Image (cartoon, rainbow, N blue to C red):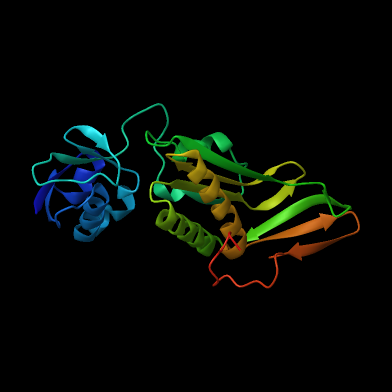
Amino acid sequence: MKITVLLFAGLAETAGTSQVELELNEGATVLDVKQALGEQLPDLKSSLENCFASVNQEYATDSQPVQASDEIALLPPVSGGSEEESDEDRFLITTEPLSADRVIQQVVNPYAGAVLTFVGTVREFTNGQKTVYLKYEAYQDMAVKTMKQIEQEILEKWPDARVAIHHRIGELDIEEISVIIAVATPHRDDSFKAGRYAIERLKQIVPIWKKEIWEDGSEWKGHQLGPWNPTEKLDLDS
């Protein structure tokens, strides 16, 4: 079937047109529309994740079916109370202090009934040993890439999820926040499962290391859950 997709604001500007025709199979969904549009207009791919679709002038989920007679539009974020952030900002390595409010705002959306937020902080005692401070180091480009990989893996299991991961590097004092992960889903059970998956997968594959500085020495710490193999799939049921 042939459908017409309406584009607005920055999407239309990037595409150079306010409407695009797509050829889709019968039974296609809003997600199929987004994927087909990204394939036809690759310059739009990075923007589509931040967009909502409307079908017949009502907001639609990615799983909603579309028909040739529908009026379909893709809508970039509307003007609001906060400055629009790019998709890159959802996956962040930074030396600056982290904000849970900021990360939550990056995932909350009209279809999210639950937002699971994990905040990792620097603790003072580990196995009876007193830590003075921690130093984090990251292979930054690869770290962001693998954070995005985690999101894609989550979307395969929980297609309606939205994920943001921020990790701080440099020297962190006791009680400072080192990492924040937020996962928004329509239902709370999925947010618990997807949030745990994100946390454990981050430990497994994201190239970030920490150095524990104690009163009497220091040590770089890596994977501590058995032999490290970042190519393995994560199985939380085993």
Q: How many labels does the image show?
A: 0
Quarter of the image holding residue 78?
top left
- Can the viewer see residue 148? yes
Of residues 26 and 54, the one nearer the viewer is 26
Expressed as whole percent of the image width and height from the top left, the position of residue 117 reads 57, 41
* Picture residue at 11% right of the left edge, 49% below the top: 3
Q: In this view, does 155 lie above or below 189?
A: below
Going by the picture, which residue comes out furthest to the top?
A: 81
Determine whether, in the image, residue 74 is placed left or right of residue 47.
left
Q: Is residue 59 above or below residue 81?
A: below
Expressed as whole percent of the image width and height from the top left, the position of residue 33 reads 21, 51
Expressed as whole percent of the image width and height from the top left, the position of residue 232 reads 55, 71
Determine whether, in the image, residue 152 is placed left or right of residue 56.
right
Screen quadrant of the N terminus? bottom left
- Can the viewer see residue 94? no
Determine whether, in the image, residue 162 is placed left or right of residue 224.
left
Going by the picture, which residue comes out furthest to the right?
A: 216
Screen quadrant of the C terminus? bottom right
* Picture residue at 58% right of the left edge, 51% below the top: 196
* Picture residue at 78% right of the left edge, 57% below the top: 212
